[in-house]
Image (tube, helix red, strand yellow):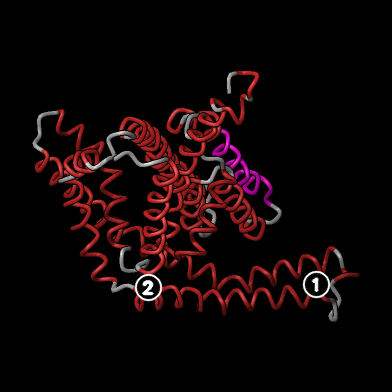
Amino acid sequence: MVLSVREQAKYWGIVAAIILLLLWFLGDVILPFVLGGAIAYCLDPIADRLQRAGLSRALAVVTISLIAVLIVVVAILLVIPMMVQEAGALVNMAPDLFQRLQDWLTTTFPSIMDQDSTIRQQLTNIGAAIQSRGGQLLNGVLTSALSLINVLVLIIIVPVVAFYLLLDWDRMVARIDDLLPRDHAPTIRRLGREIDATLASFILGQGTVCLILGTFYVVSLMAVGLNFGLFVGFLAGVISFIPYVGALVGGALALGLALFQFWGDWVWIGAVAGIFAFGQIIEGNVLTPKLVGESVGLHPVWLIFALSVFGSLFGFVGMLVAVPVAAMIGVVTRFGIGQYKQGGLYLGRQNGG
């Protein structure tokens, strides 16, 4: 029995609603599986290449796992402790930074920085608030993570889930393909290929861009001697997956720190500004066009909106699935617009609609 379009839309709507409800109620429970699936998806092309090079699927997955474990161990032993230390020092230094700003404003603009000035009081309050709330935020994040997610279990489950999903990835894709409704299988496969291309271009390509930019910012800022250069460069690299945001946030933070550290030495202040200007030029003209391409179709505003909505509705898990879901919605929307432009509603009766 062939289902009508209305009945098919109803059933697919029910499936989408069930998925959203599961994501809502099981958010933190399914976090290890979402992370494991994301890792397996990103590593599957590498496993396929190793298979084409002559390795079996199992040996390819074991090789990838050993390299990943080595990278994680090095990060835990060398990089992460330094990052945490710099972040804590930056929070504790905030009152001193605002005090310096206050002193400079007092010297430069004495009329607006008298003892009872609102600006002076606000700067003092902001510095103290960042120090107190910054420590509370770090402790709160850690406490929330420990209360909502057993960190030990997370560390164990995510690699195991990623390992088995990566091992069986091709079989799972074939099984899902076998379950597709036969009438719509060609269209769903085409949409699936477009979604996969979008995700691969964005996640893998933009991930490489973030890694290159983060490394460049860290090395360059530490080379000029900027305090907290490791933390600022890492932060700018991580959020560079949203175009321009990483450079703006990281550049503003680095320039602010440079003004306090190198005040009067304009060469070094200009060097810090030049690092982010050069990074933005390289990102916009070389890295993003070469590694991501122009066909991704994920506008920065759409990404920010998706991250905000899914993060608000589903928490951390929502932020993890925001980019894939945004890519899927974008592909389906473009498909729908194409169908609309071929239909009678758009063409009208005079054009054969």
Dominant SS type (magenta): helix
Q: Could you tell whether 208 is left or right of 349 in the image?
A: left
Q: Is residue 41 above or below residue 124?
A: above
Q: Is residue 320 above or below residue 60?
A: below
Distance from Cα at disc 2 to Cα at disc 1: 37 Å
Nearer-N-terminus badge (2/1): 1
Q: Which mark is residue 93?
A: none
Q: Is residue 205 magenta?
A: no
**For the view shown, which residue lies furthest in the right direction?**
111
The spot of residue 125 in percent (x, y) is 70, 78
Q: Is residue 266 magenta?
A: yes
Q: Nearer the viewer, mark 2 or mark 1?
A: 2
- Residue displayed at 36% across by 32% down: 187
Dividing the picture into quarters, in which one does residue 253 lie? bottom right
The residue identified by callout 1 is 119
The spot of residue 57 in percent (x, y) is 12, 39
Q: Callout 1: helix, strand or loop? A: helix
Q: Could you tell whether 303 is left or right of 76 in the image?
A: right
What residue range appears in magenta? 265-281
Say few, some or many: other residues with alpha carbon within 10 Å of mark 2 (under 14 / 14 to 19 / 20 or more).
Answer: few
The spot of residue 91 in percent (x, y) is 54, 71
The residue identified by callout 2 is 145
Dividing the picture into quarters, in which one does residue 35 lie? bottom left
Residue type, numbered disc 2: Ala
Q: Callout 2: helix, strand or loop? A: helix
Residue type, numbered disc 1: Ile
- Residue displayed at 50% across by 69% down: 89
Q: Nearer the viewer, residue 170 or 4?
A: 4
Quadrant in which the C terminus appears = top right
- Residue displayed at 27% across by 59% down: 33
Q: Nearer the viewer, residue 249 or 6?
A: 6
**For the view shown, which residue lies furthest in the top direction?**
351
